[in-house]
Image (spheres, grey):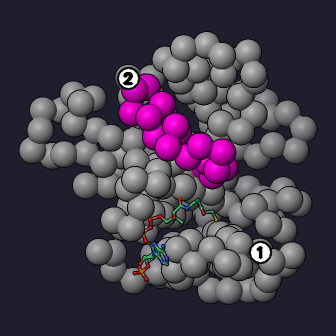
């Protein structure tokens, strides 16, 4: 079953294993791009704790935003086994999804409200489609009735994921396809 979970250090082993699979590939929606080098050289558990704290800070409405940042809620895409005991062993981090409450100039042009990725070993199982649906419900709950989602022109899996969620193409800017989604408009998920 695909679910969204708030980042939590109890899942550090699965989180770390998921990130390792990406190698040098950008991990969209994980919020890990700006992790400082000195943090990267700590243990995986310590790195995870740093990232979790940072993502909680970005989501916290009481913490002022710096520069051009927008408030964002980050989720880990989890595959949980409902038949197993409900400890961390029955949950696997299969991907990442970030939901941004607003658009700054960059996000309006190319970034969009949502960024996401699924770990390479778990692609093609429908996790992205289901996670995107849940993320759209989250943004709708915050009052957004139009959500911008973008992907590169040659990213067919992402394009299909967005179209299945009800994405309507507005235009293509610098090889980036820009789709608007009205939450609740997509087709039924597998
Ligand atoms: C894009 C991505 C998140 C899709 O994740 P996923 O869990 O494999 O996607 P799903 O299994 O939900 O499949 C989504 C759609 O893509 C299609 N798809 C999956 N793999 C595909 C492939 N290799 N080629 C073409 N289509 C593919 C599926 O058939 C499905 O389309 P359908 O609903 O019309 O059948 C994943 O490929 C990924 O993480 N890519 C790298 C990061 C990235 O590009 N993120 C998006 C940034 S815009």
Q: Is residue 142 above or below residue 150?
A: above
- Which percent across, then down, holds residue 36? 75, 24
The quadrant of the image that shows the C terminus is: bottom left
Q: Which residue is mark 1?
A: 176
Please report the residue visible at 62 percent of the width from the left and 57 percent of the height from the top.
115
- Which percent across, then down, holds residue 83? 9, 44
In magenta stretch: residue 155: no
* Number of dots carrying numbers: 2
Neighbourhood count class around disc 2 (C-alpha, 10 Å): few under 14, some 14–19, many 20 upward: some
Q: Is residue 81 among the parts visible in the rendering?
A: yes
In magenta stretch: residue 15: yes
Q: Is residue 116 left or right of residue 39?
A: left
Magenta-tinted stretch? 12-29
Residue furthest to the left in view is 83
- Which percent across, then down, holds residue 22? 55, 46
Magenta-drawn stretch, dominant element (helix, strand or loop): helix
Q: Quadrant of residue 169?
A: bottom right
In this view of the protein, which residue sits in the foreground, 139 or 162?
A: 162
In this view of the protein, which residue sits in the foreground, 1 or 117?
A: 117
Separation of residues labelled 2 and 1 (CA atoms): 36 Å
The label shown at residue 142 is none
Q: Are marks 2 and 1 in contact (CB under 8 Å)?
A: no
Q: Which residue is mark 2?
A: 10
Neighbourhood count class around disc 1 (C-alpha, 10 Å): few under 14, some 14–19, many 20 upward: some
Q: Cβ of disc 1 within 8 Å of ligand 1?
A: no
Please report the residue visible at 39 percent of the width from the left and 83 percent of the height from the top.
187
Q: Is residue 15 above or below residue 190?
A: above
- Which percent across, then down, holds residue 58? 68, 34
Q: Secondary structure at mark 2?
A: helix
The quadrant of the image that shows the N terminus is: bottom left
Please report the residue visible at 30 percent of the width from the left and 48 percent of the height from the top.
79
């Amino acid at each position: 079953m695909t679910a969204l979970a708030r980042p939590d250090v109890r899942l550090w082993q699965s989180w770390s294993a998921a990130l390792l699979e990406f190698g040098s590939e950008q991990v969209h929606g994980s919020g890990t791009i700006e992790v400082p080098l000195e943090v990267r050289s700590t243990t995986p558990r310590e790195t995870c704790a740093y990232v979790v704290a940072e993502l909680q800070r970005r989501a916290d409405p009481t913490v002022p935003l710096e520069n051009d940042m927008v408030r964002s809620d980050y989720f880990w895409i989890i595959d949980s086994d409902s038949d197993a005991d409900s400890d961390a062993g029955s949950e696997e981090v299969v991907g990442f999804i970030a939901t941004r409450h607003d658009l700054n100039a960059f996000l309006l042009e190319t970034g969009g409200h949502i960024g996401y990725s699924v770990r390479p070993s778990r692609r093609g199982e429908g996790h992205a489609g289901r996670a995107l649906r849940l993320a759209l419900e989250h943004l709708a709950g915050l009052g957004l009735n139009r959500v911008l989602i973008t992907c590169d022109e040659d990213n067919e899996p992402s394009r299909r994921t967005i179209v299945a969620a009800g994405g309507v193409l507005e235009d293509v800017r610098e090889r980036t396809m820009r789709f608007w989604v009205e939450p609740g408009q997509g087709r039924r998920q597998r």
